[in-house]
Image (cartoon, grey):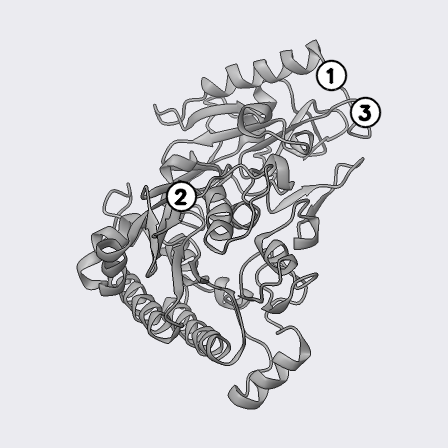
Amino acid sequence: MKILIIGLDGASPQLVERWINQLPTFKRFKEEGTLGLSIPPAPAQTPVAWTTFMTGKNPGKHGIFSFAMRKTGTYERRIIYPELIKSKTIWKIASEHGKKIGVINMPMTTPKEIKGFMIPGFLHKDEGIPYPSEVQKRIRKKLDIEQIQGDLETEVLGKVKQDPDNFFKRIHEITDQQSKVSLFLLQEEKWDLFATVFMGTDRIQHFFWKYIDENHPEYEHSKYCEETKKYYMKMDEIINVFLETAPGNTTTILLSDHGFCPIQKEVLLNNYLQESGLLKMRDNKIDLKKSKAVSYGYGDIWLNLKGREPHGLVSLGKDYEKTREKMIHDLHKVRVDQKYPIKMVRKREQIYWGPYVDEAPDLLVFFNKGWQAARHPEIDTIKRRDKRYVIDNPRWSGGHDGAHDPQEVPGIFGILGPKTHCEEAKCNLWDLAPTILHLMGIQISSDMDGKPICSIKS
């Protein structure tokens, strides 16, 4: 059996269900196969979620906890990259079993140690460059494309509000190019496991969710809802072409790494840590050496731990637990505009398990819909009597990663194949790797957290 994976980053099951009668290919999955939900890990963040999918493991076993992680022994942060993954991916496992792999534009992928071809995606230093060079030459000769543009350019993202029409135009152009390259490789190259990930759904929904979701507190009727629906319809047509093009013995999996929820305000967690006496300021900047705790964004909180941080103030043991309990207690009491933005605060060992839990943030703050953490280590330098530390007009009106309960931002999951049967229409992202390996007849590693949710019909 061949496996074809079509990823739609951030695709929302809420929107798929809402527009299902205008999405005939999605409807086919629902009627002839399975169409349901995929639950992301925490945080429901692109690199964390796609790595969880590729490894079949929670972040405590694969070691990716955020877009940026602490440099060991320092207060500095570094943007993550695929080589930091500390577990085998399905691409490597399948390659070791003699299978040929084709992967296009999936975040957190690297062509290292795979048997086949790859165009690395988001967060790889060679993003968009086909590997190996022979495949790059064939794409250049046939399609006159040297490198694919897997995601929007920074300058386009920076001018969405000034020029939204160009934003949508570029998304369609990028999608068309990737579809063309993917279908070419699907037909011309040998493969047993093929995956391609389109980023457009995520980018649209971050900026335009308040025009799409009628339950958004700031919902506005506009043409951008119709533009979003047109993009979903475009993807529906593209998926159908993939189905028609793939060999008859192919099982196709539809997948998104997370969904979306409304964002109206961002909370400056560091100000509330300051109110608790845990964070100190110097010259209008956070004093990392004198602070007991700090948030670097996305809802994470790190303690200044002795033996881990260069100038640690908190000792492991009773002091560590007492400090975490104080933060949990104080953050649960935060009220803004007569509302409680924080849904829950969890210790890292309550969320993750495995050999790399100690590399996770000490606490993770989950927000109610409409709220999220500031995405950077921001702080209001003015102490306010009303203790209202909020960004009222965030850049995005839709979110998923800053941080929200994974159950509240599920992605889509669909499977359609001639001999495939699924027991359930809801899964965790870590269930997909063992499911794919099972369908391909490859033994599943005992340390994977997921389990196969589909079987082969006799």
Q: Which residue is mark 3?
A: 307
Q: Tag 3: residue type?
A: Gly
For label 2, count other residues whose C-alpha is less than 10 Å away and answer few (under 14), some (14-19) or many (20+).
Answer: some
Query: Quarter of the image holding residue 336?
Result: top left
State which tag comes first along the sequence, 3 or 1: 3
Tag of residue 453: 2
Residue highlighted by disc 1: 316
Quarter of the figure that contains the N terminus = bottom left
Give the Cα separation between the discs numbered 3 and 1. 9 Å
* Residue at x-position 39% and y-position 61%: 251
Q: CA distance from mark 3 to mark 2?
A: 43 Å
**Left or right: 209 as drawn, with respect to 345:** left
Residue 119 visible to an observer of this rendering: yes
* Numbered mark located on residue 281 in the image: none
Query: Outermost residue toward the left?
Result: 21
Q: CA distance from mark 1 to mark 2?
A: 40 Å
**Secondary structure at numbered mark 1:** loop
- Residue 166 image point, x, y percent: 40, 72
SS of the residue under disc 3 = loop
387 or 24: which is nearer to us?
Answer: 24
Q: Furthest-front residue in view? A: 458
Q: Percent x, y for residue 453?
A: 40, 43
Label 3 Cα neighbours within 10 Å, binned few <14 / some 14-19 / many ≥20: few
Disc 3 + disc 1, Cβ < 8 Å: yes
Query: Disc 3 or 2, which lies upstream in sequence?
Result: 3
Residue at position x 44%, y 43% from top?
Answer: 452
Whether 53 is drawn above or below 129: the answer is: above
Secondary structure of residue under mark 2: loop
x and y, in percent, of residue 207 in the image: 40, 55
Mark 3 vs mark 2: in front: 2
